[in-house]
Amino acid sequence: MTTAATPPATSASPTARQVWTHSRGVVLAFALLLAGAAVLATLRSDARHHALDPRSGDPHGSRAVAELLADHGVSTRVVTTVAEARTATGPDTTLLVAAPDLLTEHRRRELRSATAGSGGRTLLVAPGARSVETLAPGVTTAPVTSRASTLDPDCALPAARRAGSADTGGIRYLTTRRDADECYPSNRLATLVRVPDTTGDGDTVVLGAPDILHNDRLDEEGNASLALQLLGSRPHLVWYLPSLSDTSAADQDEEKSFFDLIPSGWLWGTLQLFVAAALAALWRARRLGPLVPEKLPVAIRASETVEGRARLYRRADARDHAASALRSATRTRLAPLTGVPVTQAHTPETLVPALSTHLDADRQPLRSLLFGPPPADDTGLITLADQLDALEREVRRP
C-alpha cells in the first residue's frame, strides 16, 4: 500500500508580520494616549490650590491679601486640621475658617470650644445655617434674595466705615445680640456681622461672601481695606482650610455604613427590580412550539465547511478528534464496498477481515490504519489522511 505526498496546508496561523500589520494602529493610538497623559501629568505636576487658599495665585485664590498682610507685619499660617487650629488660637491670633460648612458637627463644636474666650478673632467665611449657629451663637441665616455684590457699610463698625463700600453681598444674617455690629445690609439684613465674646476681648466676624478675599476682586471698591482690617487686627493669622484628611475618633464614630446612606425604600425597590428581571427572563425564554428548521439564506460550499472545521481543530490542537473523524468517515464508505453492513463498519473484527480478503493484504496494517492510536503531530495527521485516501482509492479500483 503506497502513501501519497504531503499536500500543502489549506489554512495557516497568522505570522508575526500579519499580526503587527493588523494591530499596529491600535498600538500606536495607545502609545500616543500614554504620551499625552505623561505630558499632562508633567505640566500639572506643580502644586495647585483651591479657592480661598493664601498660597494660590488663581483668580479665586487669596495670595494677594496674604502678601499685603505680610507687608503690614502679619504672619499667615495655613492649617488643615481642627487640632492645628485649636492649638493656634490665642489673644494675638486671627483664625479664618475658609469653609465652615465642610466641618462635621463634632468638629464645629471642638472649634467653638477653642475659640470662645480665647481673646482672639474668628472670621467665618460664608457659613451656612448649621455651621453659623454652632460657631457664632446668636446668629442665624436668612433666605437669600437677589444678590447685590457691592454694598455700603451703614453701621458704626470702624473697620467698615473706613473701608466704605465693599463686595460683601451674599448670605444674609440675623442676630439677637444687642451688642453685635450689623454691616453692609442687603434688603435690610446684614451680610457682615461682628459678635463680641461674652468673656475676654475676642470676637467673631461672620462674612456673607468671600469676594473681598479673592485675588481678582481685592483691588475693587474698599475690598482690600476691609480685608486688611478684618484679618490684620492681630499679629498672627491662622488660615484654616478644612480637608478630608482631618478625621478624629468622634468623626469615625459618626460614620455610617453604606446601607445607612441608602434611602429606606431600597429593599422594596430591589425586590421589584428582581421580580421584573425574573419576568423578563421568563418572557424571553418561553417556547411557543418545537423548533422549525429554516433554509440558510446563502449556500455554503462543503469545502468551506471542511476548511473551517479544520481550522478549529488546529487551533484547539485536537489531532485525536480530527483523526477519529477521518477514520470514521473512511470506514463508513469502505464497508458497503466490501459487503459489510454499515452498522458493523466500526467493528474491527468484521471490517478488517473483509478488507483483507478484498485486497489480499495483511490484516495488522489495515487494523492499525483504521483503528490505531491518534497521530503524535500534524505531520502524522496529514500522513494518516493520505494513507486513508490511498486505501479508499485502492478498494474502489475495479
Image (cartoon, rainbow, N blue to C red):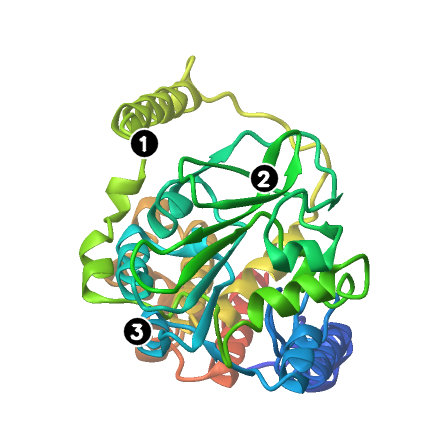
Residue type beneath disc 1? Pro
Q: Are marks 1 and 3 in contact (CB under 8 Å)?
A: no
- Examine the rendered structure and indicate whether residue 365 appears above or below residue 391: below
Q: Decide: few, some or many residues near mark 1? Use Cα within 10 Å; few <14, some 14-19, many ≥20.
A: few
Residue 180, numbered circle: none
Q: Position of residue 153 (x, y in %)?
A: 68, 47
Q: Determine whether the residue tagged by mark 1 lies in a helix, strand or loop.
A: loop
Relative to 241, residue 36 above or below: below
Up-down: is 354 above or below 266? below
**Disc 1: which residue:** 263
Residue 386 seen from this side: yes
Quadrant of res 144 = top right
N-terminal of the two: label 3 or label 2? 3
Q: Which residue is mark 3?
A: 83
Q: Which residue is pictured at 37% across the width and 66% down the height?
A: 357
State the SS at label 3.
helix
Residue type indicated by callout 2: Ala
Report whether residue 19 is seen: no
Image position of 4 (left or right of 141):
right
The residues tagged by marks 1 and 3 sit, at their Cα atoms, a distance apart of: 34 Å
Q: Is residue 327 above or below residue 132?
A: below
Q: Earlier in the sequence, mark 1 or mark 3?
A: 3
Image quadrant in which you'd find residue 10: bottom right
Q: Nearer the viewer, mark 1 or mark 3?
A: 3
Which residue is depicted at the point 30% across and 41% down? 261
> How many tags in the picture?
3
Task: Please indicate whether residue 396 sits to the left or right of residue 8 in the image.
Answer: left
**Quarter of the rendering occupied by the C terminus:** bottom right
Residue hosting label 2: 190
Task: In this rendered view, identify the residue nearer to me: 295 or 56.
Answer: 56
Say if mark 1 contacts mark 2, CB within 8 Å: no
